Amino acid sequence: MLENQLHCQLLGWSLTTAEITYRMPDHRNLLQSYVWQEYDLAPRFPRLVRFLDFWTENLDGPLAEVRVAHKKLIGPAELRKVDAQWRLH
């Protein structure tokens, strides 16, 4: 995990989730799913790419599909105009 998560989020790092679908090593017609989640830097995703390179080089199950989702946790504030104000005593 990153040293200072808030600082990294301010620099553009975001929570990234990848659903990795791969073929079983012994039964290539069967697919298996693996979920990977880490803070990464969009749009290049260097940590995910490094993980997928490791997978390709060291694991027997060949990759079939990788779906990536990410969400910046810190962004501009959502503002809206308030037309009324109520006070309770």
Image (spheres, helix red, strand yellow):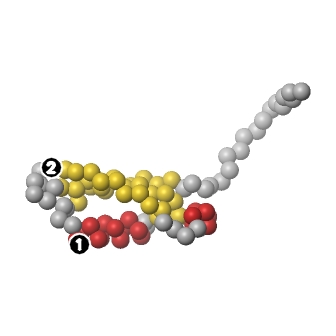
Q: Which mark is residue 31?
A: none
At label 1, the amino acid type is Glu
Q: Is residue 46 left or right of residue 21?
A: right
In the image, taking residue 41 as reference, residue 79 lies left or right, namely: right
Q: Secondary structure at mark 2?
A: loop
Q: Quadrant of residue 72?
A: bottom right
Residue at x-position 11% and y-position 55%: 28
Q: On the image, numbered disc 1 is attached to which residue?
A: 57
Is residue 40 placed above or below 73 in the rendered structure?
below
Q: Which residue is mark 2?
A: 30
Secondary structure under tag 1 reads helix
Q: Position of residue 51 (x, y in %)?
A: 34, 67
Q: Residue at x 48, y 62 (%)?
A: 39
Q: Quadrant of the C terminus?
A: top right
Q: Earlier in the sequence, mark 2 or mark 1?
A: 2
Residue under the image location 78 percent in, 35 percent down:
82
Residue 86 placed where, x, y %? Answer: 84, 28
Q: Residue furthest right?
A: 89
User: Looking at the picture, does residue 43 appear above or below residue 67?
Assistant: below
- Residue 66's spot in the image, x, y percent? 31, 56
